[in-house]
Image (cartoon, grey):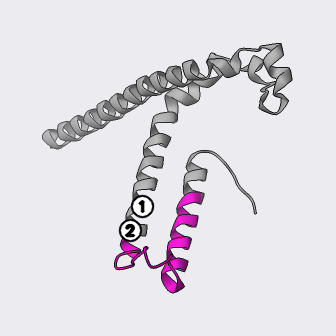
């Protein structure tokens, strides 16, 4: 009987190790992706009065309130998983749309009839899924 208890504890330890590695990798990848994005948005965070007055619609008045420490928790805990889910979602919608378009010649014209409705429904449903995964709520 002790061997079964030992096997169970080994399995639990193994899962804890896997989960720990997953969260550590996610945190590291999230920080790397965030730092890349932070460096790429430096021109939006720099406040230049002459430029901002010339283009008031492109002005970000909240840029002065942006802080790295406010972004790190989400970047470490959610960013890589969401990115992976978005990529998988995009691949699935692309594959399904291609399957439903098999046999249609787009040189003769766009989709019509039942195929058009099916592809429209798939794209709409997966777009709502992508927005939800991205944290955007849309009410129509």
Mark 2, residues whose alpha carbon is within 10 Å: few (<14), some, or many (≥20)?
A: few
List the single residue furthest toward the bottom.
113
- Residues in magenta, as a range: 98-127
- In the image, residue 14 sits, relative to residue 95, either above or below, namely above
Magenta highlight on residue 6: no
Q: Total of numbered circles in the picture?
A: 2
Residue at (79, 19) in percent of width and height: 51
Residue at (57, 21) in percent of width and height: 38
- In the image, residue 7 sits, relative to residue 62, either above or below, namely below
Magenta highlight on residue 110: yes
Q: Which disc number belongs to residue 98? A: 2
Residue at (77, 31) in percent of width and height: 58
Q: Which disc number belongs to residue 94? A: 1
Residue at (36, 34) in percent of width and height: 19
Q: At numbered mark 2, what does the secondary structure look like: helix, strand or loop?
A: helix
The secondary structure that most of the magenta stretch takes on is helix
Percent x, y of residue 50: 82, 15
Percent x, y of residue 17: 30, 30
Q: Are marks 1 and 2 in contact (CB under 8 Å)?
A: yes
Q: Which of 45 and 134 lies nearest the eye of the viewer? A: 45
Percent x, y of residue 49: 83, 14
Is residue 63 found left or right of 23 in the rendered image?
A: right
- The quadrant of the picture occupied by the N terminus is top left
- In the image, residue 3 sits, relative to residue 107, either above or below, namely above
Q: Which of 95 and 34 lies nearest the eye of the viewer? A: 95
Q: At numbered mark 1, what does the secondary structure look like: helix, strand or loop?
A: helix
List the single residue furthest toward the front.
107
Q: Which of 76 and 119 lies nearest the eye of the viewer? A: 119
Percent x, y of residue 88: 41, 51
Q: Which disc number belongs to residue 85? A: none
Is residue 133 found left or right of 47 in the rendered image?
A: left
């Amino acid at each position: 009987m002790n061997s079964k208890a030992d096997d169970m504890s080994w399995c639990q330890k193994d899962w804890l190790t896997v989960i720990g590695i997953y969260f550590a990798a996610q945190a590291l990848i999230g920080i790397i992706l965030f730092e890349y994005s932070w460096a790429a948005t430096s021109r939006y965070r720099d406040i230049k009065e002459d430029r901002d007055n010339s283009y008031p619609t492109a002005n970000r008045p909240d840029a002065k309130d942006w802080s790295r420490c406010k972004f790190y928790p989400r970047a470490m805990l959610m960013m890589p998983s969401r990115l992976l889910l978005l990529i998988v979602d995009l691949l699935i919608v692309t594959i399904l749309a291609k399957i439903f378009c098999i046999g249609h010649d787009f040189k003769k014209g766009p989709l019509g009839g039942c195929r058009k409705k099916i592809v429209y429904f798939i794209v709409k449903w997966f777009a709502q899924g992508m927005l939800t995964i991205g944290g955007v709520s849309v009410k129509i």
